[in-house]
Amino acid sequence: MLLIPQVGRNDNALIIEYKTTKTLENLDAVAQAGLAQIIAKQYHTKVKTYPHVRKITSIALAFCGKEVTLAYRVDEVNAYR
């Protein structure tokens, strides 16, 4: 999921990846794998077309039933341009 802020409201875009697992032991690894997928598949390329966006927060959520964990990273858009 890609969330782009309105012009003049904010300068931080969000990229969110959802993953599920059947065992709690894998929860952290699945979240890290989701973050790696965001980076490897270059989900940030669409964000580069919005000149008002300065930061990208990439979030990977991993679910196991009602349990959830996340992995994230924040990057400056200039690093991608």
Image (cartoon, helix red, strand yellow):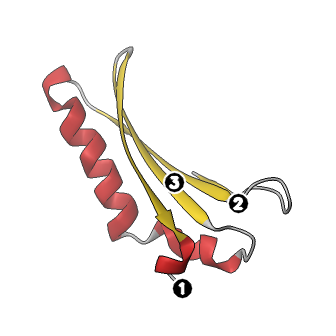
Which of the 4 image quadrants contains residue 36? bottom left
Q: Report the residue marked by disc 1.
A: 81
Relative to 59, does residue 44 appear above or below in the rendering?
A: below
Q: Secondary structure at mark 2?
A: loop
Q: Report the residue marked by disc 3.
A: 57
First along the sequence among labels 1 and 3: 3
Which of the 4 image quadrants contains residue 6? bottom right
Residue at left offset 33%, top offset 49%: 34
Q: Amino acid at mark 1?
A: Arg
- Residue 16 visible to the viewer: yes
How many discs appear?
A: 3
Identity of the residue furthest to the top in this view: 66
First along the sequence among labels 2 and 3: 2
Residue at left offset 47%, top offset 78%: 79
Q: Secondary structure at mark 1?
A: loop
Q: Tell me the crowding category of disc 3: few under 14, some 14 to 19, or many 20 or more residues within 10 angstroms, Cα based.
A: some
Q: Is residue 43 left or right of residue 3?
A: left
Whether residues under marks 1 and 3 lie with C-beta atoms below 8 angstroms apart, the answer is no
Q: Report the residue marked by disc 2.
A: 11
Q: Amino acid at mark 2?
A: Asp
Q: Position of residue 22 (x, y in %)?
A: 22, 25
